[in-house]
């Protein structure tokens, strides 16, 4: 490869000769050099080979005019390469900058932020999500993107977005999942929390309640607690909210699952009077349930009386995030509804079947469902004891790290409960 095997400086004529070579490898190597004249790189930015244009796009010394041209290149990978480079130039780039080169860079960023290829926009978002002085209008464009993989990074992380920006985005209505990204931001203000709480996005509200750094006014929290009884997804984060007001704890004790009551009673920030009131609320529940005369619905655990968050589990499963770690966290958080939803989705089982298994407190049935859902054998004991509240002496333990039942027997259990679910109660 004559002339390209050395790092010796090239004359203008040598570089132009190489730029006109028939060998794309030679032209690509030239496009990667940072010591050649700008006009040579500008020439290579219009090369017939996408690989050469891609190399030119990644070159930090490429003229800004060529950047803007490559932002409209027909090859996706060329624009992706340009996005990776140009996003690093965004810090400190104010809109309306009079410097011509800055204007060209800003125009290039704006063009890429509206690129038809998701990956190009995603690269910008991922690169700019933590940049303090990125152009605000550019960040807002990415925040309102129609694809969550583009909007979520800046919605969740960008310090450029002000409360006014976030309130505008909430009011306008971001892509599904966008409100959740806002709810997970560090130090969500009271105004933003109020706006999120006023939406009908149960998953975003659950994220807000789970965010210990989110500032939530007591009145807002009271309103959410009043809406919470059928929203089991909120129960676990509610009982774990830091600085939980006493009256909120007492109200929660009136409807959350028994496991959540345990969490409430173990909180060290509740005074003795509040804990006594919690115990009284629990006692009234017990007495009230005892007057039901054997109503089957009343005898069910709380998490079997409400619809599990199937949509949440399906969304996580679709993007490959409904893994054992996520289910394990739900188990430790006593989030039984989510555990049921995860088992149903991963096992491709009907929710009715899964509910029947846990309603019967069938250790064998639960082991079979866990197996069908692809859980490791080491997790089956936790599912039985924590979620189904099966007595320790009745829990089926793994045997030598494997399931304690044969696949044939577990399949038989699945079929039995499928028939039971079909018949109904």
Image (tube, grey):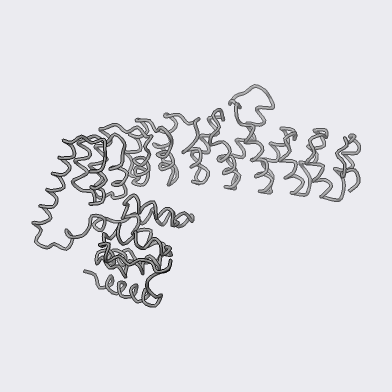
44 left or right of 96 in image: right
| In the rendered image, the vertical position of residue 403 relative to residue 58, given as above or below | below
- Of residue 83 and residue 298, the one placed in the foreground of this image is 298
- Of residue 267 and residue 22, the one placed in the foreground of this image is 267
Can you give x and y, in whole percent of width and height, for residue 346 in the image? 42, 62
Can you give x and y, in whole percent of width and height, for residue 133 in the image? 56, 27
181 left or right of 196 in image: right
Residue at 10% across, 52% down: 287
Can you give x and y, in whole percent of width and height, for residue 175 in the image? 45, 45
Residue at 60% across, 24% down: 96
- Report how many numbered discs are placed on residues in the image: 0
57 left or right of 351 in image: right
Q: Residue furthest top?
A: 98
Residue at 31% across, 69% down: 365
- Of residue 192 and residue 321, the one placed in the foreground of this image is 321
Q: Quadrant of residue 225?
A: top left
Can you give x and y, in whole percent of width and height, for residue 100 in the image? 69, 25
Q: Quadrant of residue 273?
A: top left
Q: State the quadrant of the C terminus.
A: bottom left
């Amino acid at each position: 490869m004559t002339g390209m095997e050395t790092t010796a400086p090239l004359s203008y004529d040598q570089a132009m000769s190489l730029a006109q070579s028939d060998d794309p490898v030679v032209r690509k190597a030239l496009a990667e050099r940072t010591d050649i004249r700008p006009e040579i790189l500008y020439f290579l930015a219009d090369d017939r080979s996408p690989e050469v244009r891609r190399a030119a796009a990644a070159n930090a010394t490429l003229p800004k005019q060529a950047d803007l041209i490559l932002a409209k290149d027909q090859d996706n990978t060329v624009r992706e390469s340009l996005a990776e480079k140009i996003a690093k130039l965004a810090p400190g780039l104010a809109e309306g900058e009079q410097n011509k080169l800055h204007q060209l860079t800003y125009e290039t960023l704006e063009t890429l932020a509206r690129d038809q290829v998701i990956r190009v926009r995603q690269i910008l978002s991922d690169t700019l999500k933590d940049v303090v002085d990125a152009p605000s209008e550019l960040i807002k464009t990415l925040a309102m993107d129609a694809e969550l993989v583009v909007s979520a990074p800046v919605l969740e992380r960008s310090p450029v977005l002000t409360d006014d920006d976030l309130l505008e985005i909430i009011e306008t209505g971001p892509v599904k999942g966008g409100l959740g990204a806002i709810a997970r931001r560090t130090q969500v203000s009271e105004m933003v929390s109020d706006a999120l709480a006023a939406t009908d996005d149960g998953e975003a509200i659950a994220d807000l309640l789970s965010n210990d750094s989110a500032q939530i006014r007591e009145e807002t929290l009271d309103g959410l607690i009043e809406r919470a009884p059928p929203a089991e997804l909120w129960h676990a984060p509610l009982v774990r909210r830091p600085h939980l007001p006493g009256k909120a704890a007492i109200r929660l004790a009136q409807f959350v699952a028994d496991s959540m009551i345990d969490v409430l009673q173990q909180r060290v920030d509740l005074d003795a009077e509040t804990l006594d009131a919690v115990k009284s609320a629990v006692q009234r529940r017990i007495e009230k349930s005892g007057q039901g005369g054997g109503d089957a619905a009343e005898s069910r655990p709380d998490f079997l009386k409400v619809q599990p968050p199937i949509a949440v589990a399906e969304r996580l499963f679709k993007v490959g995030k409904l893994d054992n770690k996520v289910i394990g966290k739900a188990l430790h958080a006593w989030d039984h509804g989510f555990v049921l939803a995860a088992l149903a989705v991963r096992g491709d089982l009907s929710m009715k079947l899964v509910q029947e298994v846990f309603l019967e407190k069938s250790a064998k049935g639960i082991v079979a469902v866990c197996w069908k859902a692809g859980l490791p054998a080491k997790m089956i004991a936790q599912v039985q004891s924590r979620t189904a509240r099966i007595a320790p002496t009745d829990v089926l333990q793994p045997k030598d790290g494997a399931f304690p039942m044969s696949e044939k027997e577990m399949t038989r259990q699945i079929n039995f409960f499928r028939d039971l679910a079909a018949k109904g109660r």
